[in-house]
Amino acid sequence: QAATLAQQPKKISPDLFGIFFEDISYAADGGLYAEMVQNRSFEYSPTDRKGWNALTSWDYLTDGFGYGNISVESSSPLHPNNKHYVLLTIEEPGQKGIGIRNNGFDGMVIRKGAQYHFSLFAKQESPGAGIATEVSLQNNKGEILAASKCSINNKEWKKYELTLTADGSTDSAQLVIRFTSKGSVALDMVSLFPEKTFHNRPNGLRADLAQTIADLHPKFMRFPGGCLVHGDGLGNMYRWKNTIGPVEQRIEQKNSWNYHQSAGLGYFEYFQFCEDIGAKPLPVVPAAVSCQNSGGTWRIGGTGQRGLEPDELKTYIQDVLDLIEYANGSKDSYWGAKRAAAGHLEPFHLEYIGIGNEDKITPVFKERFQKIYAAVKEKYPAVTVIGTVGPAPAGEDFELGWQFANEQKVPIVDEHYYEAPAWFLSNQHRYDHYNRNLSGVYIGEYASRGNTLGNALAEAVYMTSLERNADVVRMASYAPLLANQQHTSWNPNLIYFTNTRILPTVNYYVQQLFSRNQGDLYYDGLVSFAQKDSVLAASCVKDTRTGDLIIKIVNAGPAQTVADIQLGSLLAKNASAEVQVLSGEPGMKNTWEHPETIVPKMAAIQPGRKMQYDVIPYSLTVIRVKK
Ligand code: AHR
């Protein structure tokens, strides 16, 4: 009887394990977005970061005895959304020409034989013949690795494009543009992309980093934040409409993580990336309120939450509806046509939309959330709205958030927690008792505050409990996903990177093992241990697409143990099994010096109806029983 009952599976969310991309720690500009020029549009300003200005990352070059002048102008911009540009007057070009140089994001990585796509917008501001222009990539000794020429001779803004082929390699190249004839020239949107981007998309993503994300096989991707979504004041909210269309027409703004958002990686690129990696898009829009901490240091004081006033709110709600039309409308709809114009005729099949992120549950928030939610529900009932209950596991806003979500019957709410490993071990029954008749849960951000194997295994223990409860926990994503090693605003992260290298953490491999071995049916009670201990956990799911059964066994403790696995009649005749094991000492991490300290290793097992599996200390084992 017990065996029969145990073999009744329950349906679980097919979208359980996904990713959370926030533009934090240079995850977008200087990270996933493949643009190599920093401050390409001269829009950096001291509001982004103290000390920054329109010429940050640029040097003015007059080293060949030439002379002239450089200024930042705004009187006749390329587009009203893109206010600043540079005006160079070449009075005497000297031996080398005068010009500008960009250092990229900590130098540019150039590889021999590779091609780079250079472009800029320019106009000749002086009469007479065009301005002779030389574009080159140089190493830090000033040696030219790639070069090309053009003449800037248009009196209106025009895009000039060149292909640069490198005949040498360096990790610290600089882009140099020199003008070798007299005159005046206005410049904006100076851009350099590697020839190869992920899926060869124009205005695309860094191929190696995107592939590392794709290798997780995430079922969904939440974007673009995090706190970035509501920004640090009403004027700094992330407004999706500012981030689509030709890149030179997008509205750039301060990144509340103390840098700048070029919006080059905008909503079109996010949707396209989701599609390219087979992840469902989960955009999160602000709930028309600013961060409660805005005006002050993050989470410490600030001037408090403010909300859009009624007339602005009306427009804002329409923006949210328009986003859904942009994603899902036909190419003949107003916003669907904009998507089509960007090259995607078919809809992006948006199923989920998040409203709000960790907002304080005040009357200001409630009123605005309610209105946005009602409008989405009415116009797009098939789109699932995800609300917010802020930082869990406790706290006033968490309680109020749940209360409000229940009153409003919000389909799914977003819980976040950053806790110590011990918390994850002792809270693995958190969702066993959640009321299945209330809102479902999206764990939009979680991490156990470290990148050691011990941390990752505590997360793995917890993830088995998410599988067990994936009838109520519908989605979960580790946070944050990416961090540029030289510019981390937050630690720990799932993937660290430099311009040349990528460091997946042990936590990454845990996420990957779960995500690539996700099922849609959960079997209870098939795996048991001789003794009960919070460091031991297991799950068994079935992937009905392949018919494979997947068993995960975690031992986050120091003692070897045995797991009894009873597959009984679930085991198909002639089944085989693939086993992957992640193990080591609990304090071990993947480091830049030893990046593969802990990676999954293949092992062998002969599957049986009844099996005993020796579980080594500090390990995660995934057994995929293939039909
Ligand atoms: O993941 C980093 C930050 O943590 C997110 O921006 C915010 O939502 C959370 O508090």
Image (spheres, rainbow, N blue to C red):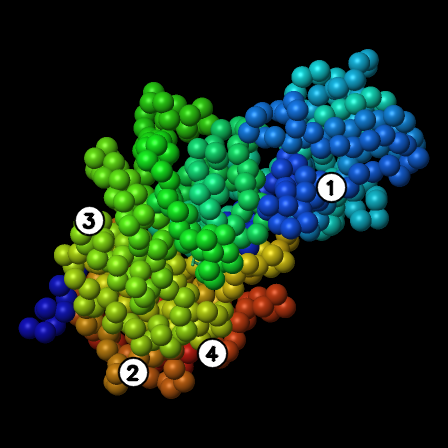
Instruction: Residue under label 1, please give it.
Output: 58
The reply to whether discs 2 and 1 touch (Cβ–Cβ < 8 Å) is: no
Instruction: Residue under label 3, please give it.
Output: 408
Residue 315 picture location, percent across and down: 36, 31
Q: Amino acid at mark 3?
A: Gln
Disc 3 or disc 2, which is closer to the eye? 3
Instruction: Residue under label 4, please give it.
Output: 586
Question: Of marks 4 and 3, which one's residue comes earlier in the chain?
Answer: 3
Picture quadrant where residue 132 is located = top right
Q: Amino acid at mark 2?
A: Asp
**Cα–Cα span, label 2 and label 1:** 58 Å
In the picture, measured across the screen, residue 559 lies left or right of residue 49, that is left
Q: Residue at x 41, y 73 (%)?
A: 420
Asked whether the viewer can see residue 224, the reply is no
Vertical arrangement, residue 174 with respect to residue 515, above or below? above
Q: Amino acid at mark 1?
A: Trp
Q: Residue at x 74, y 19 (%)?
A: 124
Element on which disc 1 rests: strand
Instruction: Residue under label 2, please give it.
Output: 533
Element on which disc 2 rests: loop
Residue 498 picture location, percent across and down: 62, 55
Q: Is mark 2 within 8 Å of ligand 1?
A: no
The reply to whether discs 1 and 4 touch (Cβ–Cβ < 8 Å) is: no
